[in-house]
Image: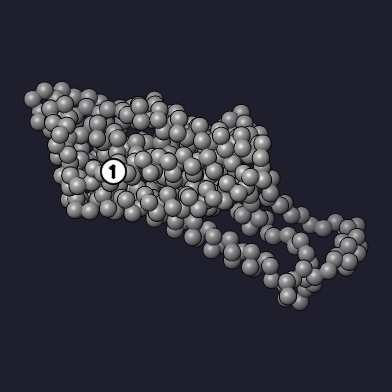
Amino acid sequence: MSADCAGNSTCPANSTEEDPPVGMEGHGSLKLVFTVLSAVMVGLVMFSFGCSVESQKLWMHLRRPWGIAVGLLCQFGLMPLTAYLLAIGFSLKPFQAMAVLIMGSCPGGTISNVLTFWVDGDMDLSISMTTCSTVAALGMMPLCLYVYTRSWTLTQNLAIPYQNIGITLVSLVVPVASGIYVNYRWPKQATVILKVGAVLGGVLLLVVAVTGVVLAKGWNTDVTLLVISCIFPLVGHVTGFLLAFLTHQSWQRCRTISIETGAQNIQLCIAMLQLSFSAEYLVQLLNFALAYGLFQVVHGLLIVAAYQAYKRRQKSKHGRQRPGGPDVCGEKQPRETSAFLDQGEEAAVTLGPVQPEQDHWTAEVTSHIPSCRQQ
């Protein structure tokens, strides 16, 4: 995974640190402001989402980590493999292929937790997956890069940003643990904090998208890398959902694993690119990382919009009175719909045929239930 850089002007060790990447000279202050602002917002968002986590459910995921195992398989199995296949399929240059592979080997990002909340996913599983994938990245990132780069000729050393991974882990665990404690001690206040956090999460997505566009302005653009940055997160969402479905996860977990698979930690990818490549290569590679971040936000918002539209349609459909039938409160939804929209695995309703001896009792009870249609 490393190569001799002696005498090579493109090696980071032989490049001057004073020379910023082309097109980045005027963005130093903006990058600093963005870094500080995003760090504060991420901490607040993770604290608020921690207020939705129940310690018992979180412990259940850790004690029986089947969902976490499937998520890690998607994160460090499917994503690096997809990155390798994309690099081969598009015939990328070695340094471009390395950037795509680095992106595919990164752990999940905080954006996945925001999107999971908006699609009624399993927040306990989402936060567990993000934390576990960040810890696993300490060993899995070097392993994935070593396995998939053996057939490539590299002219630079690849540096794993262990310090950045550690900072990310601390900034994730501390706010979430604080939120869990608040939810345990003051559940009513935790509900209010969670609502505020959902709004902050939307602002965070907007800030990430706008900043990515601003920072990429004026850069040289490689069309092939832009195409890959567009389809890569989408492939991650689809393959993650399919693998979760094939392993018989609940619909709620399928949505969660799908979001977690396609949403990568862009900050770690950028840090590794800056540590491993010279300014000449960073012109294209940082542009790819920012474009990936922009497209994963766009794809995530489209998934949220599609889910919310489907949810409203199902609620409207089952809220209407059946033609030619009585208007009965508490009418059960079909199994597929209730399972797809459930707030937990236990919420799925299993329907069965009504026993003959229950017919008279059901008719008697429903005859005393007033109509629940809102006038």
Give the image location of residue 291, x and y in percent.
30, 50
For label 1, the SS is: helix
Q: Residue at x 13, y 31 (%)?
A: 16
Q: Which residue is mark 1?
A: 31
Residue 184 placement: quadrant? top right
Display coloring: one colour
Q: Which quadrant of the figure contains the C terminus?
A: bottom right
Q: Is residue 343 visible?
A: yes
Looking at the rendered image, the quarter that the N terminus falls into is top left
- Image location (x, y in percent) of residue 143: 35, 27
Where is 216 relative to 373, above or below? above
Q: Residues within 10 Å of mark 1 (few under 14, many from 20)?
A: some
Q: Is residue 251 visible?
A: no
Q: Is residue 168 left or right of residue 145?
A: right
Relative to residue 234, is residue 125 depicted above or below? above
Using residue 37 as the reference point, say whether residue 222 is left or right of it.
Answer: left
Decide which of 204, 291 is in the foreground and name it. 204
Quarter-of-image position of residue 178: top right
Q: Residue furthest left?
A: 7
Q: Amino acid at mark 1?
A: Lys
In this rendering, the answer to whether 230 lies above or below 56 is: below
The quarter of the picture where residue 158 lies is top left
Residue under the point 37% across and 36% down: 106
Q: Residue at x 32, y 50 (%)?
A: 211
Total number of numbered discs in the rendering = 1
Task: State the image coordinates of residue 362 (x, y, percent, origin top left).
Answer: 87, 61
Residue shown at the point (64%, 51%) measured from the top left: 342
Q: Position of residue 325 (x, y in %)?
A: 78, 73
> For this view, does 351 lie left or right of residue 210?
right
Front residue of 339 and 85: 339
